[in-house]
Amino acid sequence: MKQVFSFLIVLISFSASSQSSITKVFEIPSSFYDVGIRVFPNGDGYAVFGYGGTASSSNIDIFLLRLDKDGNEIGRHFYGLPNKTERIAKGIVPVGNDGWLLAGGQVVGAGGGTQGYLVRVGATGNIIWSKNLTNSNQSGFFPYCLSALPTGGYLIGGQKLNDLEVVRISDNGDVVWHKSYGAGRAKALYVSEGGGNCFLISRNAVLKIRTSDGKLVWEKDIELPVFGSSDGDISVDLEDIVPVGNGKFAICGTALNDEILSFIQAPYTSIWKESGEILWAKIFPPNPITGEGGVTGNSLLYMPNQQNLLLTGEGNTGFGVFRMDMNGTTLATHSIPTPALCVSPVMIKHQGKYAATGGCFTDGMNTLFYRSAMNDLPDGQLRIGNRDLSPAIKIGLSPNPATSNINLNYWVETDAEINFQIFDVAGLLVLEAHQAACAGENVTALDVQSLPKGTYWLFAPQLGLSAIPWVKQ
């Protein structure tokens, strides 16, 4: 085990109180790069896993950063062999209440070949055991994702040369079986409630396999809704898959439209039955007028109590979150600022607060940690043209939430015609109404029954206000 000495840089910290939101960036180690891949609860605090290294590309280690509830460092640990490159993706699972199992890849030989690398660590970061997947059939295998089996053991998904590979291992890391399924890489996976099947995603397909012997049950390619120019080459890069109960799962990724003179990317989400039936699929493209929105789709967080999904994606000045119901209706958008370009954000919820990690380009790639103030996330700021849509106080709106009508109470100095506009969370105009107003106080009712459920913004430029948010139930 090599020793790496580094220091911590806190670039942004919005108060060190558990009642305030916290954003911090860590260098682990300095002089090269590091990125947080997953975040887990660890007592009252958090455990952030990732990988990073020094200026030599042959000296990269998996790391564990232990933080208290306010994001203060408790300790850091590194896992890897001297002068070797070890990397990890989503291959991390909690093991009971006393640590985690890590499945990553280790570069071996001058040709840059890889082999699987397993580390079992305790709650304080101590190594309990580590081993390589030395089975001769696993040469060239890079583990990417990991899931525990309810009957014991684990499934590892990854890539062997150009094939998607799944390996079943015992509790102590011995290989039980391994299967290849064609081109691609296993990006993420989960095991069904009874443990009999595994569902995993490659770059552009979903697979169902039997956990007892690895038999392929079905495989389905992703079909994307059309967005942007119909002349573009539309594709998808899937990133995450999560169960959402009742024999269903959700997947997310980034939809791409490679047009002749432009390149558009947008978050993609869909919900499937475990039988392979797609219930719905949605793309959230950027506003064609303003260009706002349209980030990547990196990870999903399912919240069963609210029956909501949070889709998290990266951005130039932070990371964005789409909140949607189980029918794909967007309920809200959130924007979490970061010091610089944010990549690969993932989010969890722990003790009533949201926590996230990823990478942040501050003098190289560094590990990001974010924790919300309370049980909420900041609302995203919407724009129409060059105009900010921020809450206003010159108009009363009720009821809120509304089901069929919204009643508007406002005051004007002189007779005027008021143009009321309603925008959805993507900044698209969905309803417009003109109303003749008399000098003094006015009351107007707008029929919104035809609008889908979700969050909207009311805009009335003649009243000298920006916009006010409201919810359609």
Image (spheres, helix red, strand yellow):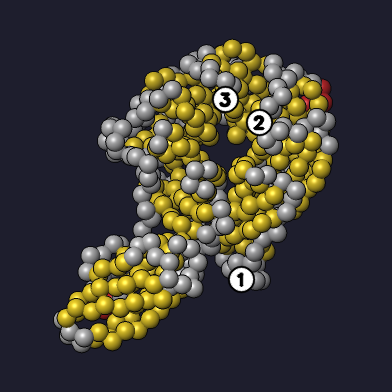
Where's residue 223, x and y in %? Answer: 70, 59
Mark 2 burial class by Cα count in 10 Å: few <14, some 14-19, many 20+? many
Total residue callouts: 3
Q: Residue at x 48, y 16 (%)?
A: 124
Identify the image quadrant of the N terminus: top right
N-term mark: 1 or 3: 3
* Residue ID for mark 3: 94
Q: Is residue 123 left or right of residue 206?
A: left
Mark 1 burial class by Cα count in 10 Å: few <14, some 14-19, many 20+? some
Q: Residue at x 65, y 31 (%)?
A: 146
Gap in angstroms between the C-alphas marked 3 and 2: 10 Å
Identify the image quadrant of the C terminus: bottom left
Q: Is residue 403 left or right of residue 271?
A: left
Badge nearest the viewer, 2 or 1: 2
The amino acid on which the numbered mark 2 sits, given as a three-letter code, is Ser
Q: Are marks 1 and 3 in contact (CB under 8 Å)?
A: no
Q: Are marks 3 and 2 in contact (CB under 8 Å)?
A: no
Depth check: give the residue in front, 119 or 85: 119
* Residue ID for mark 1: 229
Depth check: give the residue in front, 321 or 279: 279
Is disc 3 placed on a helix, strand or loop?
A: strand
The amino acid on which the numbered mark 3 sits, given as a three-letter code, is Pro
Is disc 1 placed on a helix, strand or loop?
A: loop
The amino acid on which the numbered mark 1 sits, given as a three-letter code, is Ser
N-term mark: 3 or 2: 3
Where's residue 67, x and y in %? Answer: 40, 25
Gap in angstroms between the C-alphas marked 2 and 1: 39 Å
Residue 147 has which mark? Answer: 2
N-term mark: 2 or 1: 2
Is disc 2 placed on a helix, strand or loop?
A: strand
Q: Residue at x 38, y 81 (%)?
A: 433
Tell me if residue 335 can be seen: yes
